[in-house]
Amino acid sequence: MDASFTAEQDEIRRTLRELLRKRCGPEALRAALDTQDGHDPALWPLLAGRLGLPGLALPEAYDGVGCSTAELALAAEETGRVLAPTPLLATCALAAPLVLALGTESQRAALLPRLAAGALTAALAVPGTSLATALALTGDNGGEWAGGGRAGGVQARRAGERWLLYGQVEQVLDGHSAGLLLVAAHTGGYARSRTLLFLVRGNADGLVRVRQTALDATRPQARLELRDVEGELLGEDGADVLGALATVGDAAAAVLACEAVGAADRALERTVEYVGQREQFGRAIGSFQAVKHRLADVYVGVQAARSAAYYAAWATAGREPVGGLALAQALEALRRAAAEGIQLHGGIGFTWEHEAHLYFKRAAGDELLFGPVHRLRAHAADAARLFEDREVAV
């Protein structure tokens, strides 16, 4: 593995960091969170037009840039530093790869160029709190997370040549504003249950979308209510939906890990800056050994998480699924960096006006959506058969 970045990758990071520094300061971030969509409506077109960010990991055949998951992960690291509320995760790391993996050629041709141009945003709707399970991050996704033929989740039924969807979905990232929804629905009845993905227009008849109050306001979420909403089957009947979800889940976990590393690094930077300025007993509190040791431990954790996240992003190119393990380490590093930041900022660190709590909420919110950390690690250990009984040679 070559751990160095290419000139193109360095340019992506530099350009994106400069743009976000100008457009995503603390005041701009709070203003964006108060908008109807929960993000700056002018930022996404800017990221699309100037950097081609929505199409970064999409093939050139569909008007994408033709880069890999690694470049998308590096971009996410920069958006994570400023907690930029954008449709990047929902659209580029979850929905678009599923359209690319499962969609028919006509579906790809109709949707991917619009997604790559930033003209269309998308969201993955998974029933209940089962997003991590559906993406095979915390367990096998072959279970009944989509309803299993019983009440709950979303049910799909045939009505002549059409598919009609009925049910409710909670905690859909960007579900209130996305122009396209990928809805996981159960079909086939209890005896022959299976999970399929359906394309649903954001303005479809019978669809009700309500933005929810979330722990992490920088990750807008919505509740979807579907009452006989018409959906289009994504891809062909019989496609390996669960396999595609698992593959996309590993890549999305690598992207999330890099994003969390960016947030942890920035939280640590802000804390180091503050303890170098704040004085107590006639000297900067950062000069005290106890403070130095605490921040040194945070630094080691962030750097270890960065190494794991970079490797996971590199390994998504057909090598090995380690995204969940890297995500566990990154979320743990972010939680610790944010918690130490709050503590070492003293009284101001607990205030609503300061940004310290936003980083802590990002760590806690992501763990609720994609974890928790101990389950991410447990599933990685099971996948590696770490605790299987082995004969010991005597």
Image (cartoon, rainbow, N blue to C red):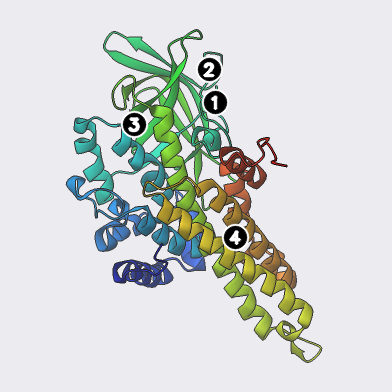
Q: Amino acid at mark 2?
A: Gly
Q: Earlier in the sequence, mark 1 or mark 3?
A: 1
Q: Say if mark 3 contacts mark 4, CB within 8 Å.
A: no
> Which residue is labeled 1 in the image?
145
Say which residue appears at 58% left-offset and 74% top-offset: 269
Where is residue 49? Give x, y as percent. Answer: 25, 59
| CA distance separating discs 1 and 4 | 30 Å
Where is residue 203? Give x, y as percent. Answer: 34, 31
Q: Earlier in the sequence, mark 3 or mark 4?
A: 3
Tell me: residue 242, above or below residue 368. Answer: above
> Which residue is labeled 3 in the image?
203
> Which residue is labeled 2 in the image?
148
Q: Tag 3, which secondary structure?
A: loop
Q: Amino acid at mark 4?
A: Tyr
Pointer 2 local density, CA inside 10 Å: few below 14, some 14–19, many at least 20: many
Q: Say if mark 3 contacts mark 2, CB within 8 Å.
A: no
Q: Is 155 left or right of 96, judged from the image as shown?
A: right
Residue 379: numbered disc: none
Where is residue 211? Give x, y as percent. Answer: 50, 39
Pointer 4 local density, CA inside 10 Å: few below 14, some 14–19, many at least 20: many
Quadrant for residue 231, please give it: top left
| CA distance separating discs 3 and 4 | 33 Å
| CA distance separating discs 3 and 2 | 27 Å
Q: Can residue 202 be spotted in the picture? A: yes
Q: Amino acid at mark 3?
A: Asn
Q: Is 300 left or right of 290, judged from the image as shown?
A: left
Please state which of the two labelled residues, at mark 4 or mark 2, is closer to the viewer.
Answer: 2
| CA distance separating discs 4 and 2 | 36 Å
Q: Say if mark 2 contacts mark 1, CB within 8 Å.
A: yes
Q: Amino acid at mark 1?
A: Trp
Tell me: residue 269, above or below residue 366. Answer: below
